Image (spheres, rainbow, N blue to C red):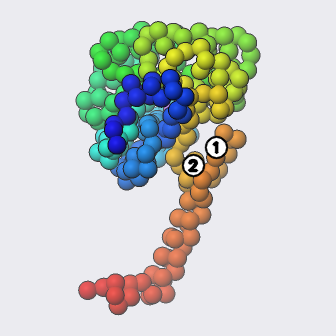
Amino acid sequence: TKRITTHTLHEMKARGEKISMLTSYDYSMAKIVDKAGIDIILVGDSASNVMAGHETTLPITLDQMIYHASSVVRAIEHCLVVVDLPFGTYQGNSKEALSSAIRIMKESGAHAVKLEGGSEILESISRILSAGIPVMGHLGLTPQSIYKFGTYVVRAKEEEEAKKLIEDAKLLEEAGCFSIVLEKIPAKLAQLVSESVSIPIIGIGAGNGVDGQVLVIHDLLGITNEFNPRFIRRYNNLYEQIEHSVLSYIKDVKSKDFPNENEQY
Ligand code: KIV
Ligand code: NA
């Protein structure tokens, strides 16, 4: 099958075909996800939570994101790979933002970057775009700002924040972003944003009126089992399955059942 590009995604929105996106952070997982036919893999800074065990996305570094992204890129043949610029690598000034984006593109081979925020970071986004690097926006609940929000509740329920969100989405489109992620906002507002711009809107906890959906793969597979917001659909219970497998292995080792005669030289 043909490789997905930012152009492909634009066409998909135009003809009403929904876009599928999932996170991956390593080679083995990305191989399965790409072969299954996903449109976009996001190397999310959620790696900070699910891979490294941090409470927030703030601690992950640019070098660590590049490690995850390069592992994913080596696995894929078909999908578009988008990489999060981690906290602290683009907010300072637009030159710093561009050099962070360039490092990701050069050192991982990924196809695009994602940044959290609207008008506040417009100059950084424009500078990255002017270097020919595709940018995905991210509005609504932006986890790198968790200490400003103070809570992970739904964003933009009030009119003022909703208005700014729509304005930000239009600004990002005008600047040249190829797509925007909307996280944890009312479904009605997300649909309104999707209808207000021509670039694809990918939702997470943003309802069904958008142009595509994204989930963290660990949530979808049920590897994480303590994080339970209503926007997750679990397609498996891998936590229990992995636990059961490990318990069985331990039992077989202790009982000297493993390895048996056929499993040795
Ligand atoms: O880091 C991440 O996984 C994300 C998605 C939830 C959109 O940014
Ligand atoms: Na992220």
Q: Residue at x 52, y 76 (%)?
A: 248
Outermost residue toward the right in this view = 158
Judge from the rendering whether residue 18 lies leftward or rightward of residue 122; answer left or right: right
Q: Residue at x 44, y 10 (%)?
A: 175
Crowding at mark 1 (Cα within 10 Å: few <14, some 14-19, many 20+): some
Outermost residue toward the bottom in this view = 261
Outermost residue toward the front in this view = 15
Asked where in the image residue 109 lies, by quadrant, the reply is: top left
Vertical relation: 106 (above or below) 48? above
**Place of residue 100 in the rendered image (x, y in percent of width and height, measured from the top left):** 33, 23
Q: Residue at x 64, y 43 (%)?
A: 232
Vertical relation: 223 (above or below) 20? below
Marking on residue 232: 1
Tell me how far mark 2 sits from mark 1, CA to CA. 7 Å
**Place of residue 64 in the rendered image (x, y in percent of width and height, measured from the top left):** 36, 38
Asked where in the image residue 262 lies, by quadrant, the reply is: bottom left
Secondary structure of residue under mark 2: helix
| Amino acid beneath label 2 | Leu
Residue contact between numbered discs 2 and 1, judged by CB atoms under 8 Å: yes
- Please say whether residue 69 is visible from this viewpoint: no
Secondary structure of residue under mark 1: loop
Location of mark 2 (residue): 220
Give the number of marks. 2
Q: Residue at x 52, y 71 (%)?
A: 245
Vertical relation: 145 (above or below) 129? below
- Please say whether residue 111 is visible from this viewpoint: yes
| Amino acid beneath label 1 | Ile
Task: Name the foreground residue: 150 vs 197.
Answer: 197
**Cβ of mark 1 under 8 A from ligand 1:** no
First of labels 2, 1 by sequence position: 2
Judge from the rendering whether residue 169 lies leftward or rightward of residue 26; answer left or right: right
